[in-house]
Image: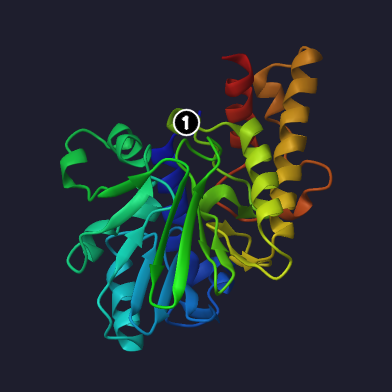
Amino acid sequence: MLSRRNFLQRLGTALAAAPVASSLLSEWPRADGFTSLRRGVGIFRQRGGTIGWLVRDGALVVVDTQSPESAPDCWTGLRDRTDNALNMVINTHHHGDHTGGNGVFAEYTDRFVAHNNVPDLMRQAAEDGEADDRTYPTETFDDEWSESVGDETIKLHYHGPAHTGGDAVIHFREANVAHVGDLVFNRAYPFIDVQGGADSQNWISVLETIHENLSDDTTVIHGHANPEFGPTGSREDLLVMRDFLSALNEYVQNQRQAGASLEEMKQKKVLDGFEDFNFDWALSLGACIEAVYQEQTN
């Protein structure tokens, strides 16, 4: 079973190799990792999950923090864009490639917002001795959270377990930009964190709910992406992710009913209709199959 630690190790290895050999760099539209999207909202890409940011008059907000190595570069780039005080950091979920840089930003704000389950999931996922070194959310919410910052309204929603047990959707309402974290691996095999509360069946429902709540004009920020498709897109990308998870669950169910073993199931390299997911990436279809198999048999 692929653990969260192994996932992060594989992802880190893939990204570390990127400057030399990997097409993953084509996800990064600018050399400094920054891309502006709309009405003061943009993204930062370097190592780990996509960081979102808001820079407006009187407002500076960061969504996710990547790692201790990349977070300082993000902060330096933000300082090139504004001298506003940092209002808050929002974490989409607990994984280290989204929260690992929290300590860097803690020098500039004491407000870290996330779903109620995130602090405990961070502690649960920490290696021995690491839990005390982490910067945890200081404000949490149950189902919904909202705050106006400058002339932007930020709304957070939790729709139940999906990629993990604490995935928040962040919607910048005036800009109409939504950061969905790792609820979408855009045309890439996802990490289904069963140990961290994942539920791939509910994940399908969550994606449908988010799709209904957004509009065709919404720009969606994804946690990870196939470089050919990139870390931003539209709400239709949510349905591609949904359809992959549906096909994955159906495949495992059908194989179990046919008497196939887990190892036999994992021999499959590509699901029909989802060939774009099969590229040089840290995760495999086999890891997804194993996670869903574990869900269905426990």
Picture coordinates of residue 23 (x, y %)? 59, 68
Residue 58, position in %: x, y?
33, 81
Give the vertical position of 249 relative to 57 (above or below): above
Q: Residue at x 53, y 74 (%)?
A: 28
Residue 75 sits in which quadrant? bottom left
Query: How many discs appear?
Result: 1
Q: Is residue 130 visible?
A: no
Q: Position of residue 184 (x, y in %)?
A: 60, 52
- The residue where tag 1 is placed is 197
Q: Residue at x 59, y 22 (%)?
A: 295
**In the image, what residue occupies the spot 77% across and 29% down?**
251
> Which structural element holds mark 1?
loop
In the picture, measured across the screen, residue 260 lies left or right of residue 112, that is: right
Judging from the image, the colouring scheme is rainbow
Image-quadrant location for residue 203: top right
In the rendered image, residue 115, in percent from the top left (x then y), is placed at 40, 44
Name the one closer to the observer, 208 or 127: 208
Give the side of residue 186 with respect to residue 168, left or right: right
Which amino acid type corresponds to the residue marked 1 in the rendered image? Gly
* Image quarter in which the C terminus is found: top right
In the depicted structure, whether residue 112 falls above or below residue 22: above
Q: Residue at x 52, y 81 (%)?
A: 39
Within 10 angstroms of label 1, few (less than 14), some, or many (20 or more) residues? some
Rendered position, 174 above or below 287: below
Residue 246 seen in this snapshot: yes
